[in-house]
Image (spheres, rainbow, N blue to C red):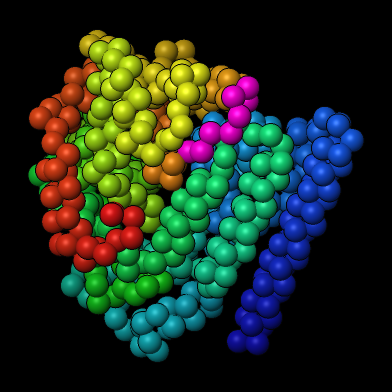
Amino acid sequence: MPESRDRESNRLSARMGRYAKVGTNMGGLAAKVAGAKLFGRELDNAKNAAELAAALGGLKGPLMKVAQLLSTIPDALPPEYTTELAQLQASAPPMGWAFVKRRMRAELGPDWQGRFAEFGREPAAAASLGQVHRATAHDGRVLACKLQYPDMASAVEADLKQLQMLFSLHRRMSPAIDTREIAKEISARVREELDYVREAAHIAMYREILSDSEEVRVPSVVEELSTGRLLTMGWLTGKPLLDYKEHSQEERNLLARTMFHAWWHPFSHFGVIHGDPHLGNYTVFEQDGAPAGMNLLDYGCIRIFPESFVHGVVELYRGLLEEDNDRIVSAYERWGFSNLKKEVIEVLNIWARFIYGPLLSDRVRSIADGVSAAEYGRKEAFRVHSALKELGPVTVPQEFVFMDRAAIGLGGVFLHLKAELNFFRLFNEQIDGFDAEQVSRRQSAALKAAGLADAPHAA
C-alpha cells in the first residue's frame, strides 16, 4: 500500500510539473504577443504552436479533448494552433489495479467486489476523464463500469484556466471571431461531463427518444451500481466502425443512414444532440453475420437546445434552399447573431452552404467529393477566417459551438464510411411537418422523464 501511495504521489507531482510547464510556456507566449504588438512585428505562429502543443501534449487530460474540439471551429484559434492541437491524443494513463480498487471502494463501499460476479482488472477502454472496466452481474448480465479518474474536477478547472489563457492570447492577435461565448459553452459542457448522474439521465432520455428505432441501441443504466463518479451500464457488444470501411456500399450506406437518424432525429424532434460524434463513441452490432445497426456508447457531451435554435436551423436550411435572404438573416438572428452587416452575412453563408450543402441537392452523393475525413471543413474554415479578418470580430453564440462541432464530426464519419446517400431526402424526412412548439413539448416531456427538467441549458 505505501508503494501504491508513492506512485500516486509521484503521478500528482508529475501532473503539477506539467501544469507548471504549460503555465511557463503560456507566459512566454503572452510576452511574445505583447512584444510583437508593441514593436509591430509578425508572430511566428507555427513555431509558437509547436512549442505549445509539445507542452500541452504531456497533460493528456480534459484539455486535449477541448483542443481537438477547437480544431473544428473556424478561427477559434489560429490555424497553425489547431493543426498542432488536433494531433494530440485525448487519453490519460490508465489507473492500475490498486488504484482502481481504492476508487471503487470510495464509490460503492468496502464490499464493492461482492456486488459483482466478476470485475475485470484491466480497463477495456480509456478516455480523457475515466476508464471502462468490463464486469459481470450476479444474474449473468455483462456490464460496462465507467470509473472516473481521481481529482478530475480540479484537473478540469486547471485545464479550463489554460483554455482561457489560449483564448485571451488569441484575442490579442486581432482575431476574426470573438471567443468569449465559445469559452463559456465549452467550459459548461466539460464540467457537465464530470457528473455521471447527469450522464445517466442523458442515457434515459436517449432510450426514450430512440425507443422506436431497431437500428440504434442505447445502453441501460444499473442505478444501484452507479454514483456521481461511477456509471454502470449494460454492455453493448459491437465492432469498431472502421472495421466496415471495406464492406459493400450497401452495408456502409446502412450504417451511415443509421448514424444520420441517430443524430438528426433527436435534434429535429427534441432539440437534443450528441455533441461528440467521435469514431470511438460508436460500435456496430451484427445479425446473421452482417451489420444491422449502431451502438451509441457515450452520453457525457449532450447538448440541449431551446426550440428557437432548432427553428433557426430549419429556417436557415429552407432559406438556403429557396435563396430567400430575409429567411436566412432571420435564422441567424434566431441563433443569437446580432448586428449582422451584409458582408458578415455573406461570410456566414460560406460556412452555412458548406454544412448544409449535401442536404440541398436531391441526388445520391457523398458528403464531400474528393475530400478526406481529416481535411473535411478545413478549406471552408480558412475562407471564413480570411473573410472575417477584414470585417472585425464576430461573436459566435454559445449554442453554435457544439452544433458546428457535431456537424463536422458527423460528416467525418460519413467520409470514413465512403457513404453515398440522398442526404436531401434523409433530412427532409426528419423536418417534414416541423413544428417548433411540438419540439418544445416533446423536449419538456423527455427531460422530465429523465429527471432533467431543471437542465440549465434547456431554457
Q: Is residue 26 above or below residue 268?
A: below
Instruction: Pinpoint residue 109: horizontal percent, then vertical percent.
Output: 38, 87
> Is residue 23 visible in this depiction of the protein?
yes
Q: Is residue 299 visible?
A: no
**For the view shown, which residue lies furthest in the right direction?**
39
Q: Nearer the viewer, residue 226 or 268?
A: 268
Q: What is the span of residues highlighted in magenta in the rendered image?
A: 389-396
What residue appears at the point 67 percent right and 48 percent down from the top-left corner? Answer: 168
Q: Is residue 69 above or below residue 393?
A: below
Give the x, y percent position of residue 334: 32, 36
Which residue corresponds to the image point at 69% horizontal and 34% vertical from the top-left? 174
At a point 62% along the width and 38% down the height, the residue shown is 77
Whether 212 is drawn above or below 375: the answer is: below
Which residue corresponds to the image point at 76% horizontal and 52% vertical from the top-left?
26
Along the line of sight, which residue is nearer the eye, 108 or 196?
Answer: 196
Q: Quadrant of residue 83?
A: top right
Q: Percent from the top left, x then y, of residue 81?
A: 67, 37
Question: Quick check: 450 left or right of 8?
Answer: left
Quick check: 62 left or right of 329?
right
Q: Point out residue 416 in the picture as x, y percentages from the top left corner.
A: 41, 27
Q: Is residue 20 left or right of residue 411?
A: right
Give whichever of 139, 271 is nearer the camera.
271
Q: Is 185 within the magenta?
A: no
